Amino acid sequence: MKLKIAIPSKGRISDPALKLLGYAGIGLKDTVNRKLFADTQHPDISVMFTRAADIPEFVADGAADLGITGMDLILEKGDRVKILEDLKFGKANLVLASPEDSSITSLKDLKDDMVVATEFPNLTHHYLHEKGINIKIVELSGSTEIAPFIGVADLIADLSSTGTTLKMNHLKVVDTIVESSVRLIANHDSFTEKKVIIEEVLTGIQGVMEAESKKLIMLNVEKQRLAQVEKAMPGMTGPTVSQVLSNKNMVAVHAVVDEKEVFKLVNRLKKVGAKDILVMSIERIIN
């Protein structure tokens, strides 16, 4: 029986999630015609496209074995799944916000007769309850930003990634309810029954994430300058050195380094005599 991975059918998570699976070696066979269910390059893995908000429930109920969706949605649905990995993208905050000209600037300004509109009633209720605040929550399915300006609510609880949408709608942040990013989640039963293939998927994804901030540097250098190169070029486990067959006085060196080190490192290597320097992207690193 195939392993089913639930992916958002659209939105800010969808394309990055598909790219991640593709780099991990389980990309879609048909990248043009998107259907509800799609085969991947792995014969035992398929993808199910659905709303991001439905993925936690589908995974919890076993309709999908794995899912990729936001932590905010996982918590909103009750967190009945096994969280396997923080995928480090789609970062956003669920925030409490009020109109720019409102007198509400902090939690101290909230009064019992106020109303907050949100697509996240459970998270908002839990947050307000923890803070000892008792105000009415109105659930909306969209266009939350407009609620304070049409008399529906005094403030909103909504997801914000950059703050731009809030500013465009003349809203200001009062407080942060929860910080969110995209997670890989699993059904508890599936994690036991399909553990081997799930761990293979997890290994592939972790390898892609590990490689994202790394570069492979390759170069040639004269043997007598090798010690200087090794000193200038620390790798994950030290640089690898091999003989250049066409020139016995030269050796080839390569190492995996942090991307942020590349600019300065290349210049250091040139100064100590490195030649034919190549900087290459890495698709996956499996530790």
Image: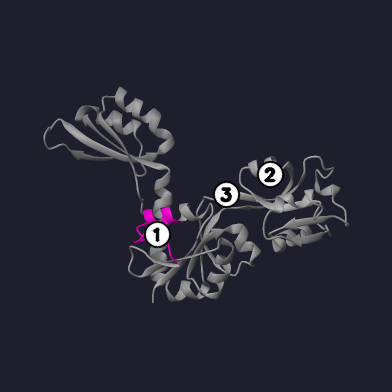
Q: Are marks 1 and 3 in contact (CB under 8 Å)?
A: no
Which of the labelled discs sits on residue 166, or is there none? 2
Which of the labelled discs sits on residue 203, or is there none? 1
| Disc number lying in front (1 or 3) | 3
Question: Which segment did they paint magenta?
Answer: 18-35
- Closer to the camera in the image, 146 or 104: 146
Give the side of residue 35 with respect to residue 98, left or right.
left
User: Would residue 46 be counted in the magenta stretch?
Assistant: no
Q: Helix, strand or loop at disc 3?
A: loop
- Residue 170 x %, y %: 73, 41
Q: Helix, strand or loop at disc 2?
A: helix
| Disc number lying in front (1 or 2) | 2
- Closer to the camera in the image, 154 or 75: 154
Q: Helix, strand or loop at disc 1?
A: helix
- Residue 53 x %, y %: 59, 63
Quarter of the image with the N terminus is bottom left
Q: Spatial distance from mark 1 to mark 3, Cα to Cα?
A: 22 Å
Under mark 1, the amino acid is Thr
Q: Earlier in the sequence, mark 2 or mark 3?
A: 3
Residue placed under numbered mark 3 in the picture = 91
Residue 244 seen in the current view: yes
- Closer to the camera in the image, 203 or 77: 77
Q: Earlier in the sequence, mark 1 or mark 2?
A: 2
Residue 287 seen in the current view: no
